[in-house]
Image: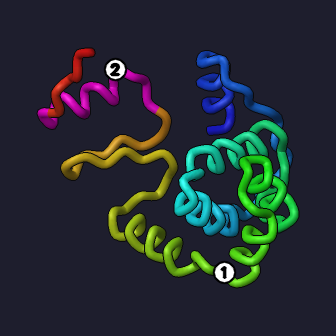
């Protein structure tokens, strides 16, 4: 799986490093909810992706997560408190529950009208899924 991800990243010109360990992303998910509420969700998720997949950082460590929050101009003090208090634990639990109920077992999984695509997909495959469900192309 990692080899496939490397190949896709290379084809797309995306950075992808040599990760030596797998780290628990639970606290990153919870802090991600905080970032989303602050309008910085995309920035935070990109920062965590880079930290984990490119730099091999332990995204389970509070200090790393606080640094990542600060790197996108969120308050480190607030991020620390969110992690310490587990403010978004229930929200992430609900996400996991919905995923389990939808039989999502891998990331990414694309669900549309009970059809599913699992794993990274090329543009044409995603387009076919959308068009087969009557999603119209927007021409600009």
Among the 4 quarters of the image, the one containing residue 10: top right
Q: Is 85 situated above or below 33?
A: below
Quarter of the image for the C terminus: give it. Answer: top left
Residue for badge 1: 86
Residue for badge 2: 124
- Along the viewing direction, whichever of 116 and 90 lies nearer the viewer: 90
Residue furthest to the bottom in view is: 85
In-image side of 4 versus 91 (left or right): right
The answer to whether residue 96 is magenta is no
Residue 122 makes an appearance in the image: yes
Tag in front: 1 or 2: 1
Q: Are marks 1 and 2 in contact (CB under 8 Å)?
A: no
Q: Earlier in the sequence, mark 1 or mark 2?
A: 1
Q: Residue at x 57, y 45 (%)?
A: 42
Secondary structure of the residue carrying tag 1 is loop
- In the rendered structure, which segment of residues is drawn in magenta? 121-134
The answer to whether residue 125 is magenta is yes
């Amino acid at each position: 799986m990692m080899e496939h991800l490397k190949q896709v990243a290379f084809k797309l010109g995306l950075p992808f490093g040599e990760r030596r360990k797998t780290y628990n992303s639970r606290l990153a998910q919870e802090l991600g909810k905080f970032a989303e509420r602050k309008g910085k969700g995309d920035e935070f998720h990109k920062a965590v992706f880079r930290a984990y997949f490119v730099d091999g950082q332990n995204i389970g460590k509070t200090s790393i997560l606080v640094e990542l929050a600060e790197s996108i101009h969120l308050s480190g003090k607030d991020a620390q408190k969110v992690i310490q208090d587990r403010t978004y634990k229930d929200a992430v639990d609900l996400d996991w529950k919905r995923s389990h109920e939808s039989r999502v077992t891998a990331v990414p999984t694309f669900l549309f009208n009970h059809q599913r695509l699992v794993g990274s997909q090329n543009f044409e495959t995603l387009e076919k899924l959308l068009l087969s469900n009557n999603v119209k192309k927007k021409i600009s």
